[in-house]
Image: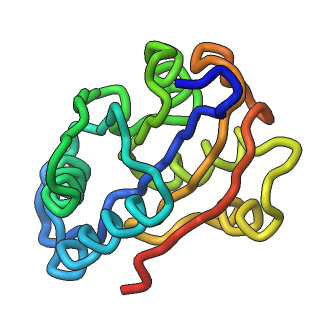
Amino acid sequence: MAGTEPRRLTLLRHAKSDQDGSPDHERVLAARGRRQAPVVAEQLRDHGRLPQLVLCSTAARTRQTWQLVADALGEGQPEVVYLDALYLADVSDVLAAVAEVHDEVGDLLVVGHEPTMSQTAARLAGPGSDPAALAQVRVGVPTAGLSLLEVDGGWVDLTPGSARLVEVLSPGL
């Protein structure tokens, strides 16, 4: 990664899940969620956000979201690390997981849950952030919503207000 190019952090809320009475950790995607995943892949591709590393919650709906996105992306699959700490996580848990990422990774995707994904984006958003994107994450992101951030320092240096929130995307389904 070039020294002047910012790192890219993408926060993905899992796609729409079924409310079928399963234990929360085992809930799977609804038909709508399965339709959202290929749109997410297209958005990642269109915005140059092909991750080198994915940190994913161990919940069934997050694992399934990532697998469907990865299938739609096709070749060149990134390494995926499934973390129990991202299930029922808060912002500090997400930041702790990101801090463990090696600085050679220039494009990182975190797949998690609400309200943590939007709260993380809101906490990280600092000077230069897009006002409309910041307003969106302050109220929450929809299922399969993507928060696109840029980071100038190393992953370990990521702190509240130290990133630029450049856009929030939704599959619109």
Q: Measured from the top left, where is residue 19 in percent x and y?
A: 21, 72
Front-lying residue, 74 or 67? 74
Q: Is residue 34 above or below residue 61?
A: below
Q: In the orientation shown, which residue stands out farthest toward the front?
A: 2
Q: Is residue 171 above or below residue 82?
A: below
**Residue depicted at x 54% and y 66%:** 141
x then y, percent, for residue 112: 38, 46
Tag count in the figure? Answer: 0
Q: Is residue 20 left or right of residue 86?
A: left
Vertical arrangement, residue 170 with respect to residue 56, above or below: below
Question: Which of 173/92 is in front?
Answer: 173
Does residue 12 show up?
yes
Residue 60 in sight here: no
- Which of the 4 image quadrants contains residue 152? top right
Q: Is residue 95 left or right of residue 27?
A: right
Seen at 15% across and 55% down, the residue is 74
Residue at x 33%, y 38% (from the top left corner)? 87
Q: Quadrant of the image for the C terminus?
A: bottom left
Q: Position of residue 155 (x, y in %)?
A: 58, 20
Left or right, 35 with reference to 48: left
Colour scheme in the image? rainbow
Of residue 144 and residue 71, the one placed in the foreground of this image is: 71
> On the rendered structure, is 55 left or right of 154?
left
Residue displayed at 29% across by 38% down: 57
Q: Is residue 75 above or below residue 134?
A: above
Q: Farthest right residue?
A: 127
